[in-house]
Amino acid sequence: MRRARSIVGVDLGGTKLAVGLVDDALGIRDRTVSPAATTSTEACLADLYRRLDEALSTYGPVDAIGVGTASMVDFRAGRVVLSTNLPLRDVPLRDLLAARYGVPVAVDNDANVACLAEHRYGAGRGASEMVMLTLGTGIGGGIITGGLLYRGASGAAGELGHMAIQLDGPRCQGACPSCGCLEVYASGRAMDRAALETARARPDSALGRALAAGDDVAGPLLSRLALAGDPVAVEVLGGIGEKLGAGIANIVNIFNPELVVVGGGAALAAEVFLEPARRVVVARAMAPQCDDVRIVPAQHGPDAGVLGAGALAIVELFPDEVSGSVQGG
Ligand SMILES: [Zn+2]
């Protein structure tokens, strides 16, 4: 039996940089996190090099480096095209790292990488047809078909948060030109908005009292209150879950996945909003696909970025070794 691969996984997010050692058999072995350097492209890259130098001197020789980043990535070219929160535009990150460290490198966006983490190490293990939704500031998506990530003609597939569920809905956020997208109704930012609107409209609710007390009334508080059983918070997140369910019903009709995994930093109270989402899917999606799908929370929280970056390197750089992994689990 061949030896396990050692991969350095890098999660280059808008606010933090996590670097860790990922083993293709055992998952994550070690991980360190620091704030991301965002003042300039040079500072961002210098910080990344410093952290990778440290990691490689600690871990010894590795087989490859995988990078997931909160950016638009041209996967085939290994290039960061654009980033909302990082000073990276048109940076050939794959080639820069490969030249500096002398090992193969793979670079992709954070939603695809999170999807790979769940597929290889989490809730999607063994699945052939899977879709992942990552609820953060926006909603990212990843699609696994035939056990492999689906990338589309230009590597930009999987923007599942930008399916319109209301044609005349509010303008979408960021670079999206559309309106009424799922992201407007069910992202972390939507939860922030719903928490504040509810606090203002219902001053005697726990959210309203928190606002009066000067607390930070946003999605995380809404999630914590809902998990603690606060009825107003449960009702508000339930409404968001129904919107999410409408989006998932579309996904189920189109892709007929066996599994939809919902994760990301804003999915803290997934157990509260996934039940209403499932009810909407049963009501709206067609048979047989709506009978065959399971909708489950992700298994990995903050580790998903590093794990997924490792999974990306394994899947993309050593594909012959993973061809049996879908069946083998
Ligand atoms: Zn949109």
Image (spheres, rainbow, N blue to C red):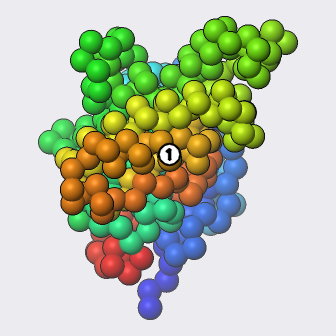
Residue bearing mark 1: 274
Q: Is residue 121 above or below residue 12?
A: below
Q: Secondary structure at mark 1?
A: helix
Packing grade of label 1 (10 A; few <14, some 14-19, many >=20) is many
Residue 323 in view in this figure: yes
Residue 264: % across, % down:
53, 42
Task: Tell me if 49 is positioned left or right of 100 in this view.
Answer: right
Nearer to me, 60 or 134: 134
Residue at the image position 49 percent from the left and 83 percent from the top:
3
Residue 176: % across, % down:
31, 19
Residue at the image position 51 percent from the left and 22 percent from the top:
190
Residue 79: % across, % down:
33, 37
Residue 196 in view in this figure: no
Residue at the right extreme of this rendering: 213
Residue at the image position 80 percent from the left and 9 percent from the top:
212
Quadrant of the rendering where the N terminus is positioned? bottom left
Label 1 beta carbon within 8 A of ligand 1: no
Quadrant of the rendering where the C terminus is positioned? bottom left
Circle count: 1
| Residue type indicated by callout 1 | Leu
Nearer to me, 318 or 58: 318
Task: Tell me if 166 is positioned left or right of 47 in this view.
Answer: left
Residue at the bottom extreme of this rendering: 1
Residue 310: % across, % down:
49, 59
Task: Tell me if 255 is positioned left or right of 281 in this view.
Answer: left
Residue at the image position 27 percent from the left and 12 percent from the top:
168
Nearer to me, 238 or 93: 238
